[in-house]
Image (cartoon, helix red, strand yellow):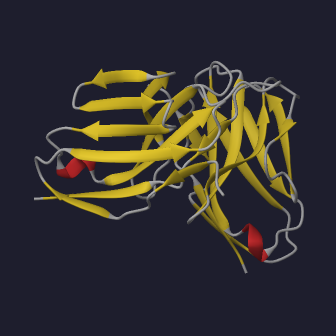
Amino acid sequence: DVKVTQSSRYLVKRTGEKVFLECVQDMDHENMFWYRQDPGLGLRLIYFSYDVKMKEKGDIPEGYSVSREKKERFSLILESASTNQTSMYLCASSLRGFDEQYFGPGTRLTVT
Amino acid sequence: QKEVEQDPGPLSVPEGAIVSLNCTYSNSAFQYFMWYRQYSRKGPELLMYTYSSGNKEDGRFTAQVDKSSKYISLFIRDSQPSDSATYLCAMSRLTGGGNKLTFGTGTQLKVEL
């Protein structure tokens, strides 16, 4: 069975903190993605990666960075968390490009 | 104006009803169309994937694409309480780096006993 796991389901952080969100997939997929999901705005792409150590900006990369040191792991970093980064964060992976993405359960992040 | 429009609902139907979920889009370059289902507090899961115009059927689910009208639909026959979820449409076009997905905001469906 395809599996994408995320390190935390719920996270509460303070403004200005550095936040790490981890994602691991066990499907040997080349491609990994980070989205945020907000009511009325849908899913928006933050960053994606086609290969180890490769990264590409998505539609809303400001305030975020990513790291992909191993094929199965893709990390999202909030360098200095702000309240407008309170959201549901979803990680996904795919075998071919953006097609047929498999999503993790999400991390609900609250920044106070 | 958003590239993809989707009625947020909620849509409430009795068990056994035929459900029609829809999305409209503005960009004629979209070529690939997908429907995802998202249960509460879970990540989306891919339900249907179609390329260009036409129909595709999978069990109780039928995806329909009308590129001339820029309109896609998902039909659910014999709806069940377990179909209660948010349904997201997604679509992609060819870009330099690959096919980025553009998502609708989702329609919340509740199937009642």
Up-down relation of residue B96 to residue B86 (above or below)? above
Left or right for B35, reference A18: left
- Residue B93: image quadrant is top right
Left or right for B92, reference B42: right
Give residue B69's position: percent from left, percent from top: 48, 37
Q: Residue at x 82, y 69 (%)?
A: A81
Q: Residue at x 89, y 60 (%)?
A: A79
Up-down relation of residue A75 to residue A25 (above or below)? below
Looking at the rendering, in which quadrant would you find the N terminus of chain A?
Answer: top left
Give residue B109's position: percent from left, percent from top: 31, 56
Looking at the rendering, in which quadrant would you find the C terminus of chain A?
Answer: bottom right
Hey, which residue is sitting farthest front in the picture? B68
| Residue A23 in sight in this render | yes
| Residue A7 in sight in this render | no
Up-down relation of residue A15 to residue B103 (above or below)? below
- Residue A42: image quadrant is bottom right
Left or right for A19, reference B100: right
- Residue B63: image quadrant is top left
Left or right for B53, reference B32: left
- Of residues B61 and A73, the one nearer the viewer is B61
Give residue A65's position: percent from left, percent from top: 87, 49
Hey, which residue is sitting farthest bottom in the picture? A112
Q: Residue at x 46, y 39 (%)?
A: B71
